[in-house]
Every structure is written in C-alpha cells, then in structure tokens.
Image: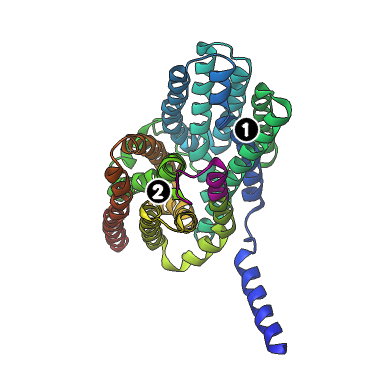
Amino acid sequence: MPRLFSILKAWIHALTHLIRLPLLDRRIWLLSAGRLLSQVGNGFTLFYAPIFFVNQVGLSATMVGIGIGSGSIAGIVGRIVGGSMADSPRWGRRSTLLWSAAVSALADVALAIADDFPVFLVGNLLMGVGIGLYWPATEAVVADIVTPEQRNEAFAIVRLADSLGLSLGVVFGGALIALTGLYRLLFVIDGLSYAIFFVLIYVAIAETLSNTDRGRSFFAGWAIALRDRPLLVYAGVNILFTTYLAQVQSTLPVYFSRFVSFDGVLGLSEAMISLLFTWHIVLAALCQLPIARGLKRFGLVWALIGSALFWGLGFLLIWFTGVTTTLALGWALAGLAVMAIATDAYTPAASALVVAIAPEALRGVYLSINSLCWAVGYFIGPTLGGWVLDQDRWVIDGFWLGSALSVLGAIAILLWLDRLLSQAQKT
C-alpha cells in the first residue's frame, strides 16, 4: 500500500508539473483574457449568423455565402495593412489592436441592425478587416514582451484562449437562442465583448514597438519579406498545415454524417458528431501547454515535423474509420485525439518560428504573412473537401489516404527549411 501511494504521488507531481501555468509577463495574460472574451462573442455569431439571416431575415443562402466570403477577402486586406501598421512607428502594435477592436465592434452594430443584403455585407466586410488587423499585431506584442525561450508557451496561451473562447461561445450561443430565440442579441453581446477588449488594451497594454525608423515607407517591409527565402519556404508548408486544420473543421463533420457506419447505420447522428468534436476540443485544450512545453527541447522546425507525423497518423485513422465495419466510433475518437495533438504541436511553434525568422523591425509584416497562410488554407480546405465529398465513394475514402501521404511533402519542405536556417546562422 505505501508503494501504491508513492507511485500515485509521483504521478500527481508529474501531472502538476505538466499543466502548471508558465511564468509570463502579465500583459500576455491580459491579452489572452481579452481575446478569450471577444472569441466567446465570435462563437455566438459565427455559427448562428447564417441560420438567422437565411431563416429569419430572408436572405438567400447564396447571398449569405457571398457576404461571409467577402469578409474573408476583407480579412486578407486587413492582414496586409495590419502587418504594416504594427511595424509602423506612426501606428504601432497598440493602435492597431485598438483599431481592430473598434472596427469589429462597429461590424457587430451593422450585423445587429441588418435587414437587407447591403448592411449584412458591410457588417461582414468590417468584421473581416477587424480580424485581419488583430492577428499580426497581437502576435507581434507577444514576441516583443517575452524571451525567445518563452515564446512557444506564450503563443500556446494566446491560441488556447482563442480556441476556448470560440468553443464556449458556440455552446453558450446555442443555449441563449434556445432560451430566448433572440438572434440579434448575439451580435449585441459580441459587440460589447469587443468594446471591453478595447478598454482592456487601452488601459493595460502599452506600446511595445521599439522600432523608430520613420524613413521607411509604409509597405516597404513587404518587399523585404517577400524576398526572404526561408519565410517563403515556411509559407508553403504553413498553407498545408492550415489546410489540414480546415479539413477537420469543415470536411470531417460532413464525412462523419454521411459516410461512417455505426451499428449498421450509415452516417453518425448529430449527437455523436457533437460528442466527437467536444472530445477533440477538450483534449486539445488540456494538452496545449504540456505539448508546447515538452517540444521546446527539440527546436521549432522539429516540433512542426512532429506535428506533421501526427497529422499523417490522424488521417490514416480517419480513413480506417470510414472503411471499417466495427468500432467506427472508437477509431474516430482516436483519429480526432491524434489530430488534437498535431494541432497543439503546430500552432505555437508556427508563430514562434516566424518570429525567429523575422527581423525585429518587421515582426508585424512577417506575422501578417503567417496569418495570410491561414486565410489561404481556410479557402483551399473547405473548397477541396466539398468537391471531394461529392465524388464516388472510392475517391472520398482515398482522399484521407492522399492527405496522409501529403505529410511526406510537408516533412520534406520542413527539412529543407531547417537546412536553410542552419546555413543562415553560419553566415
């Protein structure tokens, strides 16, 4: 019995060590808290806005799709401008974040009053710009105020707040609609969350930009960044990773609902699919910090190689989920668990790697390119996945094997990038 207690004590100590919160600058926690709050509001609106504007306002599904798609395009513009603003002494990180919060709050005002397509379109365009301004500036702030050794965990905290807030927003938004039926209230609450985020930044986040070079033109940093070979090589593999993430969120739910068998019935129920993705989200949240902490010893490129290997294994498990006749739910749980680990290995290491590549004066622009990869990946993923799911069954099942094999290309690019970075350090 004493030996059993000793073993149990050792396991508790190890677990506590893994999940302990890192000692970071308080501004990281404030920024993360604000982001979690605003993402709860985003979760309110992201999943329920299309339902509201089609079923209650009376817009066609095509018009709603065009409006949401226009927001993605505006987000690209926001990322480009936001990266240059974050690096500009005239604007800086803090002003860019304030503009992001203000524009996003204004977008919610437009969506809350929208009764026709033009106002709905304006709301989506403003929201896209607001989100586009946010990411380069906030990741530049994180890079500015932590040491290189802390970056992996700091970026993990920010991404964890982002995903947790979005997940909580989806849950609470559904509960609020079920209780009140007031869809427009979601936009009001979202707008208030951005207003609180604005105040938090204004009061608690001082400017972190140290660059005082006022002679460089506003977009000059882009000319430098687009000639940076390691950055461009990284961007290629990063688009692959973000495409993988988009497949999990857009293609997998439809695949499970139409092509996976359970107890002899083709297609998992909505309740089962909800259970699967709740498991995926919760596991990713629990493992984010331990994985980020554990991978520090291997280096950023090798952390991404590890992520790629887990993505490959995850896609293989999803393929097996579709072709097996027994225990499909168990294989799906295993596949999503592996993909949660792959995601946790990827997100902080990717941002930290861009910061390591970037000149200090151009962090905003370089992180803007990192954010643009997400926009491209989230365009390719749903488009490709939607096309595949309309094909013959052998093509659909083969898609997951093809995705697993594509990981070999990602690993080859990452090894090339590792060599380029090693050569750069020697010169």
Q: Which stretch did the figure color magenta?
A: 263-278
Residue 65, relative to residue 79: is it above or below? above
User: Mark on residue 8?
Assistant: none
Asked if residue 292 lies left or right of residue 362, the reply is: right
**Percent x, y of residue 310:** 40, 59
Q: How is the image coloured?
A: rainbow
Q: Residue at x 26, y 54 (%)?
A: 409
Secondary structure at badge 2 equals loop
Q: Residue at x 31, y 60 (%)?
A: 418
**Percent x, y of residue 69:** 43, 25
Residue 251, relative to residue 325: is it above or below? above
* Separation (CA) of disc 2 from disc 1: 38 Å
- Judge by depth and name the residue closer to the eye, 310 or 371: 310
Residue 233, relative to residue 289: is it above or below? above
Q: Residue at x 47, y 16 (%)?
A: 60
- Judge by depth and name the residue closer to the eye, 14 or 226: 14
